[in-house]
Image (cartoon, rainbow, N blue to C red):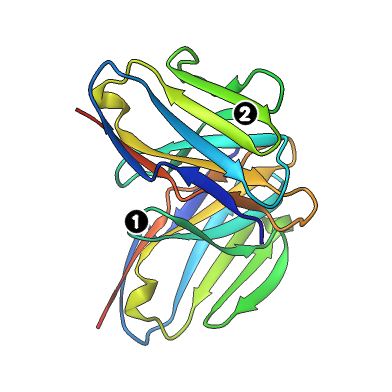
């Protein structure tokens, strides 16, 4: 099946810093989403971004489908940004989302 | 956006009993829903694909007789953990996609199952 690799696995930032999370995938996809999992386990959909660039406030994402990677940018980080960020993809040949192992982010005051 | 409702949010049950988890699409119809399981500090792993009006498709290594899936309508899928054991304790989460909105997959809020 498709491989989804996220980096870094863990990240500690001071409040106000910027960061870039990366997602590499091993096959062609027609769906890519970035999620933030909060401490209660709920998955918050950040971006549906199979290609191109999108921005939502302090967050933005870019997917280069031809090179099989996506980036999630977090600017001016806040303590509430802490949690686990997942990249999930649906290969062209599949039906369900496949998740990476996530990046665990801790933003300190 | 699309909304998926999942109940209960948490459940504690005794070993040997069965537990049913419901997943509903509130504002769209879902011919296909997906069930995932997440162990602590791990990623989400797809357990099965639930198909309305037909049998579910299970991923390799998932016991279909232990995890019974029923998708009787276009808005409801249920996962029943039968004869639960402590090793079944996990976070279960369902997902569906609104084929009209084209904005990806939406996830329920998850069910934390503890078997004692």
Q: Residue at x 74, y 41 (%)?
A: A92
Q: Residue at x 49, y 44 (%)?
A: B6
Q: Are marks 1 and 2 in contact (CB under 8 Å)?
A: no
Residue A81: x and y in percent read 39, 73
- The reply to the same-chain question for discs 1 and 2 is no
Q: Nearer the viewer, residue A51 or B39?
A: B39
Position of residue A93 in the picture relative to residue B108 (left or right): right
Q: Label 1: which residue?
A: A40
Seen as rendered, the residue at the extreme left is: B116
Position of residue A105 in the picture relative to residue B33 (left or right): left
Q: Label 2: which residue?
A: B50
Position of residue A28 in the picture relative to residue B93 (left or right): right
Do we see residue A3 in this rendering? no
**Circle 2 SS class:** strand
Chain for disc number 1: A
Quarter of image, res B110: top left
**Circle 1 SS class:** loop
Q: Nearer the viewer, residue B103 or A74?
A: B103
Q: Is residue B75 above or below residue B57?
A: below
Chain for disc number 2: B
């Amino acid at each position: 099946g498709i491989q989804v690799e996220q980096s870094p696995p863990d990240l500690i930032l001071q409040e106000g810093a910027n960061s870039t999370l990366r997602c590499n995938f091993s096959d062609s996809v027609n769906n890519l989403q970035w999620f933030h999992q909060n401490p209660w386990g709920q998955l918050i959909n950040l971006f549906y971004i199979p290609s191109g660039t999108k921005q939502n406030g302090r967050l933005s994402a870019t997917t280069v489908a031809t090179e099989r990677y996506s980036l999630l940018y977090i600017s001016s980080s806040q303590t509430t940004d802490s949690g686990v960020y997942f990249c999930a993809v649906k290969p062209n040949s599949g039906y369900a989302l496949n998740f990476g192992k996530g990046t665990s982010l801790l933003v300190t005051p | 956006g699309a909304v998926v409702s999942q109940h209960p949010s948490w459940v504690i049950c005794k070993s040997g009993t069965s537990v049913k988890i419901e997943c509903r699409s509130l504002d769209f119809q879902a011919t296909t829903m997906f069930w995932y399981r997440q162990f602590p500090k791990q990623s989400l792993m797809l357990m099965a694909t639930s198909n309305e009006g037909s049998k579910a498709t299970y991923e390799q290594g998932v016991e279909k007789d232990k995890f019974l899936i029923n998708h009787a309508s276009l808005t409801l899928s249920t996962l029943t953990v039968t004869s639960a054991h402590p090793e079944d304790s996990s976070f279960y989460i369902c997902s569906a996609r609104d084929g009209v909105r084209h904005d990806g997959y939406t996830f329920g809020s998850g069910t934390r199952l503890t078997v004692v």
